[in-house]
Image (cartoon, rainbow, N blue to C red):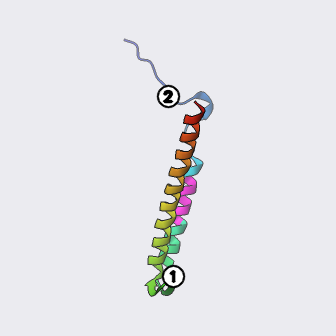
Amino acid sequence: MSYEIVDDQPAESGGMQSPPLKLVALLLVVIVAAVFFFQNGDTVNIEFLWMDVSWPARTVILISIVLGVLLDRLAGFFWRRGRRKKRETND
């Protein structure tokens, strides 16, 4: 019997690969947002359109993050949809 050693890593990689830059950036943004969230527990006055309310700053931060993510997903959807339609009309 003979056994063959299989090395999945390319020879020039030098062993372990570093994490992708996008993952590192996302982790950094999440850490900064979490620190900002937990350091701001005071109540703040919010005046938006017809509303005048007092909410904890954490709630306002959380709502802002959720709205930012939703807007990003919506913009990405329309951007991909536009590219797909443009590609279909070129074919």
The residues bearing labels 1 and 2 have C-alpha atoms spaced at a distance of 59 Å
Q: At 50% from the left edge and 85% from the top edge, which residue is drawn?
A: 46
Residue 22 visible in the snapshot: yes
The answer to which of 19 and 90 lies nearer the viewer is 90
The answer to which of 78 and 53 lies nearer the viewer is 78
Residue 19 visible in the snapshot: no
Q: Which mark is residue 36?
A: none
> Which residue is disc 2 drawn over?
8
Q: Are marks 1 and 2 in contact (CB under 8 Å)?
A: no
Instruction: Please state the horizontal and vertical placement of residue 16, each as a whole percent of the image.
Output: 55, 39
The answer to which of 43 and 30 lies nearer the viewer is 43
Q: Nearer the viewer, mark 1 or mark 2?
A: 1
Which secondary structure lies at badge 2?
A: loop
Range covered by the magenta-colored residues: 24-31
Prevailing SS of the magenta stretch: helix
Identify the amino acid type marked 2.
Asp
In the figure, is residue 59 to the left or right of 76? left
Query: Where, by quadrant of the figure, is residue 2 drawn?
Result: top left
Q: How many marks?
A: 2
In terms of sequence position, does the residue under pointer 1 or pointer 2 come before the other? 2
73 above or below 65?
Answer: above
Q: At 50% from the left edge and 50% from the top edge, which residue is drawn?
A: 77
Location of the C terminus by quadrant is top right
Location of the N terminus by quadrant is top left
Q: Which residue is outermost to the right?
A: 12
Instruction: Please state the horizontal and vertical placement of residue 5, each as a whole percent of the image.
Output: 46, 22
55 above or below 87?
Answer: below
> Which residue is disc 1 drawn over?
49
Identify the amino acid type marked 1.
Leu
